Amino acid sequence: MEIDNLYAADDSCQMQLVSRGHHDIESFRKACERFLREWDERECELDTSKVKQTHWTTREPEDHETLVDEGDSVFTESDKENGFPVTIYNEWLPIRS
């Protein structure tokens, strides 16, 4: 499973971790912990209760948007019919430990 980090667009130096598709919660948590170790050698135990499975869609960002993919598009929750499945660690994490 591929983990991506999405940056807060508000200059708060925070990120969220996400993977396309609905994944086993424990496997996703472990993959996020590996991602953080490789990202900045961060050792942490993430809380599985903060893992969320939902559906997202993308659109052009507006000035007040906070979760972007390299500034190109904004992810927003959507219904199953109009979005794609994602698993997210639903807590903002610092970009650097």
Image: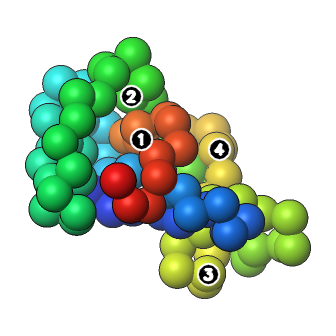
Q: Please tell me which of labels 1 and 3 falls first in the chain.
A: 3
Q: Please tell me which of labels 2 and 3 falls first in the chain.
A: 2
Q: Which mark is residue 69?
A: none
Q: What residue does disc 1 label?
A: 88
Q: Please tell me which of labels 4 and 3 falls first in the chain.
A: 3
Count neighbours of disc 2 (C-alpha within 10 A) and say few if under 14, some if 14 to 19, many if 20 or more.
many
| Mark 4 → mark 2, Cα distance in angstroms | 17 Å
Q: Which amino acid does label 2 sit on?
A: Val
Residues marked 2 and 1 touching at CB (< 8 Å): yes
Is 19 placed above or below 23 here?
A: below
Q: Please tell me which of labels 2 and 1 falls first in the chain.
A: 2
Q: Residue 78 carries which label?
A: 4
Residue 84 showing in the rendered view: no
For the point 64% across and 44% down, the residue is 77
Residue 72: quadrant of the picture: bottom right
Mark 2 element type: strand
| Mark 1 → mark 4, Cα distance in angstroms | 14 Å
